[in-house]
Image (cartoon, grey):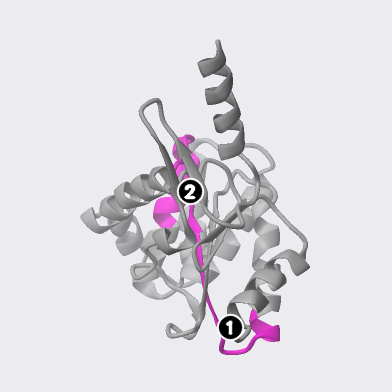
Amino acid sequence: MLKKCILALLCLLSGLAAFKVGQLLVTKEEITILTPDDIHPSINNFPSKGDTAAKVTIVDYFNFSCRYCDSIDPLIDSLMVEFPGAIRYCAKPFPLEKDKGRRLMVRALLASAEQNRYWETLTLLRSMVEQGKTTLSYKETKKRIAHISDSLKLDTKKLFDDMHSKRIEKLLETGDAEAKNYNIRRIPTVIINGQITTGLYPYYHYKDIVEKILSPK
């Protein structure tokens, strides 16, 4: 009974919203604490804003089912204005989408990077979700993706071909593995130089983290 209570407590701790020091991973066999130095999200194959050599790297994990995720972008954009040249920002779709239509949207977003329209496609896909109100059928999702492609003057045939390419499959596979490795179970999850924050927080929360990273030691 005591062992069960301890395990339950550890699981509760692993689900806390923000981790100032590291991320706690709990399994039946062992407990692993990941420090910020252990957490390095792969973003080389994803478009980003800001200087690639910036001292601060912010990775935002989101999905198209999350009503809070859209609120992260304006906060990060404000940080980039307040700390010019100091931040590199990557918005990374959370790969563990279960709905087939939403999963297709992730594929479309990743494929749009091949035509240098990642951020524009992201904006329109989010707008598509808002307009749809409820989960769209796979057929309707595909139709709206095609409409977005046309509106951005993309090569729609190439977009749909790329959506099912080996490169996209690899990105989805590595994304799934990364989310599990870092114990990312909820979104939005923001990683700032290895420091994980899960949930939506006020602007000053993210600003405080960035200031501490940039302040002389």
Rendered image quadrant of residue 157: bottom left
Q: Distance between the residues labelled 2 and 1?
A: 53 Å
Q: Which of marks 2 and 1 is in front?
A: 1
Q: What element carries label 2?
A: helix
Residue positioned most to the bottom:
85
Q: Which of 97 and 44 is in front in this view?
A: 44
In the rendered picture of this protein, how many numbered marks are placed on residues?
Answer: 2
Q: Which of 66 and 61 is in front in this view?
A: 61
Q: Which label sits on residue 117? A: none
Q: Residue 133 location, x and y as percent?
A: 69, 42
Let me know if residue 112 appears in the view. Answer: yes
91 left or right, relative to 112: right
Q: Name the residue under label 1.
A: 217
Q: Which label sits on residue 143? A: 2
Sequence-wise first label, 2 or 1: 2
**Mark 2 residue type:** Lys
Mark 2 Cα-neighbour bin, 10 Å: few <14, some 14–19, many ≥20 = few
Tell me the magenta residue range: 80-108
Residue occupying the point 52% across, 35% down: 137
Q: If the image is split into quadrants, where does the N terminus sit?
A: top right
**Mark 1 residue type:** Lys
Q: Does the magenta stretch include residue 138?
A: no
